[in-house]
Image: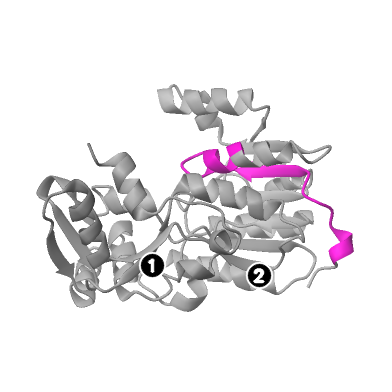
Amino acid sequence: MTNDSSIPTSRDILVIGAGELGMPVIRNVVRRAKDVEGSSVSVLLRAGALASTAPDKQRDIAEIKNLGVKIVEGDLVKNTVDEFASIFADYDTVIGCTGITAGLQTPMKVAQAALQAGVPRYFPWQFGVDFDVIGRGSPQDIFDSQLDVRDLLRSQDQTEWVIISTGMFMNYLFEPGSGMVDLPNDTVNALGSLETAVTVTTPEDIGVLTADILFAEPRIRDEIVYLAGDTITYGELAETLETVLERPFRRVVWTVPSLLDELAADPDNMTRKYRAVFAQGRGVAWAKDDTYNARHAIPVTDLRQWVEENLAG
C-alpha cells in the first residue's frame, strides 16, 4: 500500500487516447480539474491522428484544443517503454483510454513505462469486465495480458493504481458487428442463454464517473471500482426493446458450445473471442446496487433510457 501523504492530488494529468472513451474522459476531467488549483490536462495522440483529414478526427482535435488540453505526440506501437517513461515522467497521473487496438503487448508496455517513470497514480486501460473473476485461459486471450498488468501493479507499492470496471459499452449491444441485437430483423441473439447477464455502461457516463473517481476525497487508490449503467439479462434486453419500440422481437440463443466451435474455426476473430467470453457469463456482470455510481447517487443512463433516446421514434 502506498503512503497516503507521499502523493499529491492529481494536478498534472495525461490521458492516453481520444477515441470513443478518451473524449468523454477528457471533457469531464477538464471540467473537474478547473476546481483544482494549478491543474493541467494533456492527451497523448498518434501523429496519424493529428494529421487525419477525417471530419470526426478533425472535430475531436478542434474540441481538444478549445478545451485547453495540451497535445503530446506518441505511438503505442512504435514507442519503447523507455520513450513512454520519459513522456510520463512529466505527469502525476496517467489515464489509459486507448482500448485494445494497439495489440496484446501494449497494456503491459504502458504499465511498465508508468512504473519506470515513477508516475504517482495510474489508471490502466481496464475499462471493461472483471478479469480476476474470468481468470486466465479464457477464449479472449487479451484478458490474460490484462491480468499480467494487474499482477504487476499489485506487486509494487510506489505507484497507486485505480482500475475501473464498467462492463460492456452499452452501444456495443446494438452495433451490427456484435450480433447481439439485429434491429433490421427484430431479433435478440442471446449469448449463452436468455438468463445470461451483462453489465453495460455508456462511454459518456464512464467519462463522468472516471473524473469523479479521479478527484474523489478521500483519494481512491489501489482499488478496483465498479460502475454500471445497467445490469440486464438478454431476455430483459428483448423485453425492453419490445416495450419501448412497440414491436415483437425474436429470441435466439447462441450457446457456449456453438460459439466455441465458431471460434475454433476462426481463432483470430476478435468478435468471436468476445462472444464466447460473454456467453460464459462469468465476470461480465455485477449488481448495480453495489456500484460506485449507485453508492454516490450519480445518475447514469440505463438500458431503457438509451433505447428511448437512440432507437425510438
Q: Are marks 2 and 1 in contact (CB under 8 Å)?
A: no
Query: Circle 2 — which element?
Result: helix
**Residue 252 x %, y %:** 13, 65
Residue at the (75%, 60%) spot, across then down: 219
- On the image, the x and y values in percent for residue 34 come to 74, 36
Residue numbers of the magenta segment: 4-27
Q: Residue at the spot x=72%, y=51% of the render?
A: 215
Dot placed on the residue nearer the N-terminal end, 2 or 1: 1
Residue 116: where, in percent of width, then height? 75, 58
Answer above or below: position of 78 versus 178: above
Give the label on residue 204, or none: none
Residue 97 visible from this viewpoint: no
* Residue 220 within the magenta-colored segment of the rendering: no
Front-lying residue, 20 or 86? 20
Residue 61 sits above or below residue 249 on the image: above
- Which of 45 and 198 lies nearest the eye of the viewer? 198
Dot 2, crowdedness within 10 Å: few (<14), some or many (≥20)? some
Q: Is residue 73 left or right of residue 104?
A: right
State whether residue 249 appears in this view: yes
Say above or below: 8 vs 47. Answer: below
Q: Determine the image quadrant of residue 64.
A: top right
Q: Quadrant of the C terminus?
A: top left
Residue drawn at x 54%, y 62% as measured from the top left? 294
Judged from the image, the secondary structure of the residue bearing numbered disc 1 is loop
Residue shown at 46% from the left, 42% from the top: 20
Give, as a three-letter code, the residue at label 2: Leu
- C-alpha distance separating marks 2 and 1: 20 Å
What residue did someone put label 2 on? 152
Picture quadrant where residue 310 is located: top left
Instruction: Specify the label residue 140 is tagged with.
Output: 1
Residue 268, how many percent across, how many down?
31, 61
Asked whether 15 falls inside the magenta stretch, the response is yes
